[in-house]
Image (spheres, coloured by chain):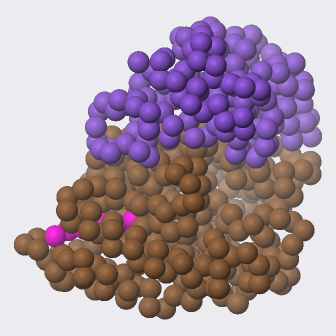
Chain colours: A purple, B brown
């Protein structure tokens, strides 16, 4: 079955007709030519396809595009227009926060979403006191909050350093 | 994935009316489990009814002091809610122990309860599985069953329920509000999920077409001192081998009341009724906690590959109760 939807992708209105089976990830990559989000596992387990939808980080491979009519999608390509975008991109470069780079667009989008969650006061699995109003983003907090993004090259120490710098 | 029609009705009765008469229809909320199952060929709905935008996305105080959680509230928002973190810390902790941040931003309260087992054979459409294809056999019994049940299993199914959130809701005696063609009904969490028995294809007591609209938390004062402990094979982003949700009320060194539920051990979140009975009136000591845990696990029937879960569950229960008694959390 075909459906016609409109997505706002990196600030631009993008109407598109697609089969209802199409994931948001495939809609972005195959139909709209937005190749920043990557397909890793296609099961929501690796985080390479992470984008911000209406400001929240999600795995775009598990979203059916037809359910996202009217949504605002920010990919790594458009992240520069967001407050956290440029500092994160700069920090990943400065700290060598990647090797092959395949997971990087998902990592930076996830980091941007993570910083917003932290500013909103969200706790995590490693937070000792769930009732605390302020939770400092120490290394354990950053690692836990980024556990939805895998890096097969193992660039984790440098990814951590990059995010730590922006989180300060 | 087979082709399907997509509808997004404006209200819950409209959604129920679309799904109820069609066995090939399914509700879609966060999609983190269903979309994956459609891709794997485990679920093959020909009509998807999107309920993710229905107005069930609020967390409200109830007149009796309890809290109503809308079925469409995202797992991340529920975990972040100050009301939940302060009054029901075991629930916030259970949510934060589940999945990844990206998935918690999608997954809903109702969908979390309806997620299906992560049994590797259930998820592999090429192997026999009584839950996926009734009567085809259970591949796990003679297979790799490190992650399978030690309590309440049947000859036909040894799968476990994967949810962390549901374990806390079971310990809290939450109530699930459900809308069906015949109207609304309320199902206690302790009766919501089934044991496999002869019908492992049925995870819950819901009938086809019934829609979860909310989950009500009772005004349980002792829940303010509660915890969730999850034992898993890596530090983050993995399903539980064993988990424990517990609340403990102690006065003058004696246990006044206790709530305990286990995850990762059975086809449903396992309310530890025997342990709670043994704890009430007992001295708040590690010996008494161990005796209560042993009482709960006396009927455990582990498989050759998961016998470790019995002492692991016992030790996790003792550790959570000991920490709660010492005034700590989590």
The one of B288 and B80 positioned closer to us in this rendering:
B288
Q: What residue do we see at 69% from left, 19% from top?
A: A76
Q: What residue do we see at 77% from left, 26% from top?
A: A100
Q: What residue do we see at 55% from left, 11% from top?
A: A87
Which segment is the magenta one? Answer: B245-250
Tell me the quadrant of the picture where the C terminus of chain B can be found. bottom left
Q: Is residue B26 left or right of residue B191?
A: right
Answer whether residue B165 is magenta in the image: no
Residue B259 picture location, percent across and down: 32, 71
Asked if residue B201 can be seen in this view, the reply is: no
Quarter location, residue B50? top right
Q: Is residue B184 left or right of residue B273?
A: right
Asked if residue A30 can be seen in this view, the reply is: yes
Q: What residue do we see at 70% from left, 20% from top?
A: A75
Above or below residue A56? Residue B175 is: below
Q: Is residue B220 left or right of residue A76?
A: left
Residue A127 picture location, percent across and down: 37, 42
Above or below residue A65? Residue B138 is: below
Residue B132 picture location, percent across and down: 80, 71
The one of B30 and B47 positioned closer to us in this rendering:
B30
Q: Is residue B119 left or right of residue B243?
A: right
Above or below residue B178? Residue B18 is: above
Residue extending farthest left: B252
Magenta segment, prevailing SS (helix, strand or loop): strand
Count of numbered labels shown in the rendering: 0
Residue A35 picture location, percent across and down: 82, 21
């Amino acid at each position: 079955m075909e459906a016609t939807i409109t997505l706002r992708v990196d600030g631009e209105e993008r109407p598109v007709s697609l089969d209802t089976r199409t994931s948001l990830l495939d809609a972005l990559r195959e139909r709209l030519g937005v190749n920043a989000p990557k397909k890793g596992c296609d099961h929501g387990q690796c985080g390479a396809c992470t984008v911000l939808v209406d400001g929240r980080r999600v795995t775009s491979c598990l979203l059916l595009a037809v359910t996202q009519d009217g949504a605002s999608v920010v990919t790594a390509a458009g992240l520069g227009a967001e407050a956290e975008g440029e500092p994160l991109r700069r920090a990943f470069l400065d700290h060598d926060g990647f090797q092959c780079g395949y997971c990087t667009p998902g990592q930076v989008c996830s980091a941007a979403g993570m910083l917003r969650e932290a500013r909103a006061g969200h706790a995590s699995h490693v937070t000792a006191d769930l009732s605390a109003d302020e939770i400092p983003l120490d290394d354990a907090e950053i690692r836990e909050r980024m556990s939805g993004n895998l890096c097969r090259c193992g660039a984790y120490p440098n990814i951590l350093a990059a995010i730590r710098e922006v989180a300060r | 994935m087979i082709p399907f029609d997509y509808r997004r009705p404006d209200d819950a009765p409209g959604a129920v009316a679309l799904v109820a008469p069609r066995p090939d229809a399914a509700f879609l909320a966060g999609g983190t489990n269903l979309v994956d199952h459609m891709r794997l060929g485990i679920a093959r709905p020909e009509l998807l009814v999107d309920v993710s935008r229905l107005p069930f996305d609020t967390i409200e105080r109830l007149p009796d002091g309890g809290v109503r959680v809308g079925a469409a509230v995202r797992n991340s928002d529920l975990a972040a809610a100050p009301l939940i973190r302060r009054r029901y810390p075991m629930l916030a902790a259970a949510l934060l122990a589940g999945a990844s941040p990206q998935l918690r931003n999608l997954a809903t309260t109702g969908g979390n309860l309806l997620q299906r087992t992560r049994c590797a054979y259930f998820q592999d459409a090429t192997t026999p599985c009584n839950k996926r294809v009734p009567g085809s056999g259970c591949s796990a019994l003679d297979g790799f069953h490190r992650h399978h049940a030690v309590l309440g299993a049947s000859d036909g199914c040894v799968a476990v329920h994967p949810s962390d959130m549901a374990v806390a809701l079971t310990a809290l005696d939450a109530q699930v509000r459900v809308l069906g063609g015949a109207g609304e009904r309320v199902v206690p969490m302790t009766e919501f999920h089934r044991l496999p028995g002869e019908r492992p294809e049925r995870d819950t007591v819901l009938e086809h077409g019934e829609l979860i609209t909310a989950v009500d938390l009772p005004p349980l004062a002792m829940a303010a001192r509660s915890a969730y402990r999850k034992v898993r094979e890596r530090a983050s982003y993995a399903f539980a081998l064993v988990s424990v949700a517990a609340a403990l009320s102690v006065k003058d060194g004696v246990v006044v009341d206790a709530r305990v539920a286990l995850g990762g051990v059975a086809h449903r979140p396992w309310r530890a009724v025997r342990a709670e009975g043994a704890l009430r009136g007992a001295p708040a000591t590690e010996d008494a906690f161990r005796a209560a845990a042993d009482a709960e696990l006396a009927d455990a029937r582990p498989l050759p590959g998961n016998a470790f879960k019995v002492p692991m569950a016992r030790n996790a229960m003792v550790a959570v109760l000991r920490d709660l008694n010492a005034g700590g959390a989590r």
